[in-house]
Amino acid sequence: MTLPRLRPLEAYPFEENGETFYYLRDPQDFAPDPVVVNGLQYFILSLLNGKNSLQDVCRKFEEAFSGVVLSEADLRGLVEQFDGYLLLETPRYQAHLQQLFTDFRESPLRKAWHAGVCYPEDPLLLRQKITEFYLDPAGAGLEARPRSAGGYPLRAILVPHIDLRVGAPCYTHAYRDLAASTDADLFIVLGIAHSGGSGFMIASEKDFETPLGRVETDRAFLAAWEKNLGHSLCEEEFVHRSEHSIEFQLPFLQERLERPFKILPVLCGSMYSYVHHASPDIPDLLAYTESLRRTIRESGRKVFFILSVDLAHMGPKFGDGFAVDENRAEVIKKQDLDMFEVLSRLDRRNFFELVRKDLLKRNVDACGAAYTLLSLMEEGAGELVAYDQNLQRDSNSIVTYGSMLFFGPAW
């Protein structure tokens, strides 16, 4: 009997009473709950590769743990338990996944997946919490003012999407002056497809639910863009289901704006498959940006861009073979500031060189969204208004993030 394959999971070791345990999480949120296993169970899971049989796993277990016997009956019970947690590629998991697809497809709304966990689901508490973010010592304060630079109005912002429980004050530096600086009525939010997807851009036509109310997606604009592009942008819409990078922006946007507005939610894919190009003028990618530029101009809409991105993800937690300490964090900060300097000049060519030689190596997830903005914004300037780092000492890893304002002429 061949045992099923373990699904892709994130595993975080931790110590308790001198024993090592592993916190298992499904990065795609298909399994509804995280699971904690001990070291022996973790070893068994590592052997579930879709090739090993019951006998193979029992033998390898006993070879690794001399004197500890694993019976076939006990192993069957463990496998059934793991399957109940939806950790394995089995018919039970496939049926569950199909139901998730059906439920998402039939819902007119993309629900507020992270409300009640990463931020309050009560609207009054959420507004209070956002005010606290602004008033935090690391926040921007509440006093807003119109912003412009070089005679150009504010056209776009770059904002983190790090967990609000960690880095929310940094968001406020991008959002504080928004309402006083733009009369835009369509906000194109470029997030990151953390859970994958084969397209460079994946849109959703669903309205987005937040504790502060429903945010309407501009389906007419999306349809016009798809017509100009020549194909659908929503074939992999399911990746929006639990993705946080767009969701985290919407309460800040709702809190700042008192006028009607719509959004266009778009998740950007990886640029790994494009690094062999010597030039940023990549036909496959320019097809997206040029068709978007044409759609903006034909629509007559007042468009504003929000880039929901984080920067470096480095250390053992992200697959690196080194720990990140304060000294390495300073090096990473310098690399991040070098990137922001290139962005401030709207220098698409040198930014693409950074993508090829530095940013992807440091797991900077801003690449696709920033490339898109620089392809559309040929004049103007960017201004860095906040930068921070989340140095995670328990895993010797780091996530960096910042906020930037972009000023330029109409699209």
Image: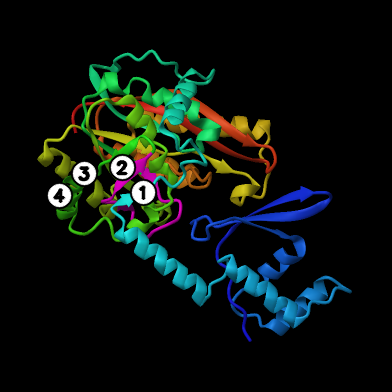
Question: Can you tell which of label 1 and label 4 is closer to the viewer?
Answer: 4
Looking at the image, do the residues carrying marks 4 and 2 touch, with CB atoms under 8 Å apart?
no
**Mark 1 — residue?**
268
**Mark 4 — residue?**
224
Vertical arrangement, residue 142 with respect to residue 11, above or below = above
Q: Is residue 220 left or right of residue 308?
A: left
Secondary structure, mark 4, is helix
Kindly identify the residue that appears in the image at 65 percent across and 80 percent down: 52
**Mark 2 — residue?**
372
Looking at the image, do the residues carrying marks 2 and 1 touch, with CB atoms under 8 Å apart?
yes
* Amino acid, disc 2: Thr
**Mark 3 — residue?**
218
Q: Give the crowd class for mark 4: few <14, some 14-19, many >=20 residues within 10 Å.
A: some
Kindly identify the residue that appears in the image at 46 percent across and 68 percent down: 96
* Amino acid, disc 3: Asp
Kindly identify the residue that appears in the image at 36 percent across and 53 percent down: 277
> What x and y, as percent, mark residue 47?
67, 72
* Amino acid, disc 4: Ala
Please report the bounds of the magenta region as a residue range. Answer: 191-210
Please tell me how many numbered marks the rendered image carries. 4
For the residues marked 1 and 3, what is the alpha-carbon distance in whole angstroms? 18 Å
